[in-house]
Amino acid sequence: MRGSGPDRGVLLAATELFTQRSRHDVEEKRIFLELACNLLPSTSLQDRRRIATLLAGHPEIPEDLLGALAGDPDELTAYPALRYSPGLSVDLLLRTAVAGPDSLRKAIANRPSLRESVIGALCDHAGANVIGILLDRDDVTLTPDHRARLGRRSDIVATLGLELAGRDALNPDGLMGQFLHLPNQLKARAIAAAEMTSLVKQAQAPGSGSQVRARPPRRKLCDGLHREALRQDATRFADLLSQGLGLPLETCELLLRQDQGDGLTIALKALGMSARQVTAVLIRLCPGLSLDHLRGLLRLYRTLGMGAAEVLVDQWMLQDQGTQPRHETQFQDTGRRGGIASAAKLPESVPLGKTAGS
């Protein structure tokens, strides 16, 4: 049986001898590599971990053996090679950054030097603790692409939003797209970015200035949402909101959470819902709101421009779907054609907010 009897411990003993010297001739390295490749698969877990630790910083560790150790299924065996060995291939580092786990991604994040492609893979897949290592490194500069990747990850923004913003790792689009996951301290910055974006769009639009008007309120949709709020039917409300705004249903269900009153207010503002209707929606569907919180949300409704609200919702759409913003809804078009006479008569099966032309 392989790995039993006299073979047990042979590779560890050979490794200890090999690492006592920093230089070896070609023949010595060939013999050690052949021995290691033959015995490593049957070497005990404890010995593999010790061997990996001994070889990780050795200047002449054979590349094939280095790759075998770094790819070992045991994390404590793979960690030293991933953390300290300079000769690992970029492909191996990329595969590990994608596959994980985070304990091995942490080893990669702490390596003395990192390729941009490896940093990008970590930005896409690593957890907050690993991303925090990258942010704390003075010798790692996040490119615009890296920042964009982090800005698309709600879990990272929710945990490290302040750190990302402090290092300019959240661009305005990232702030607006991740509004629902931002720490409260950054939401004002996202709203300011939306207001500025709205002003720029107006300035760039043909016939800008006093001739630029917000899109007309979708009154039938707003009336339908108001009706469902009065019934306290959160499920139907979220469905209508999803269809009306073109947002995924999961996002609209998120908007109805107790801690997402500002997001819900922005969504209703983007639809052109009246202050009276917004108040009713917040009271009926967010019954746990304190009076001060309710007043703050209504203040947000009054001060936020409709153009800025639309910009924010469009960024949520881009964040969730990866598509271009869709503005006009079939609900509104159908209402103009007279196909829907009254929101109160809408059947439950009518798709209210599917994008026109989609």
Image (cartoon, rainbow, N blue to C red):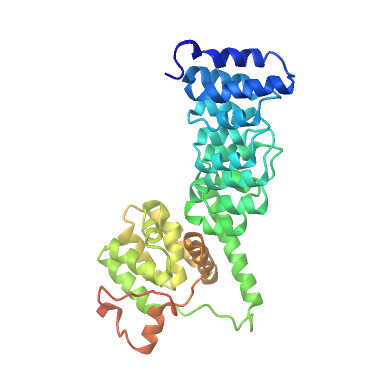
What residue do we see at 32% from left, 73% from top? 224
Nearest the camera: 265 or 293? Answer: 265
Extreme residue toward the bottom, this view:
337
What residue do we see at 30% from left, 78% from top? 343
Q: Is residue 224 above or below residue 303?
A: below
Nearest the camera: 210 or 68? Answer: 68
Where residue 78 appears, as percent x and y from the top left, is: 54, 29
Q: Is residue 315 above or below residue 45?
A: below
Q: Is residue 306 above or below residue 159?
A: below
Where residue 190 appears, as percent x and y from the top left, is: 56, 57
Nearest the camera: 277 or 58? Answer: 58
Q: Is residue 240 left or right of residue 26?
A: left
Location of the N terminus (image quadrant): top left
Location of the C terminus (image quadrant): bottom left
What residue do we see at 66% from left, 16% from top? 18
Q: Is residue 293 left or right of residue 132?
A: left
Question: Hey, which quadrant is residue 88 in on the image?
Answer: top right
What residue do we see at 40% from left, 79% from top? 330
Where residue 82 appears, as percent x and y from the top left, is: 60, 31
The answer to whether one can see residue 170 in this image is: no
The answer to whether one can see residue 92 in this image is: yes
Question: Hey, which quadrant is residue 140 in on the image?
Answer: top right
Nearest the camera: 124 or 307? Answer: 124
Where residue 195 appears, as percent x and y from the top left, is: 59, 65
Q: Is residue 105 above or below residue 262?
A: above
Question: Hey, which quadrant is residue 50 in on the image?
Answer: top right
Q: Is residue 67 left or right of residue 44?
A: right
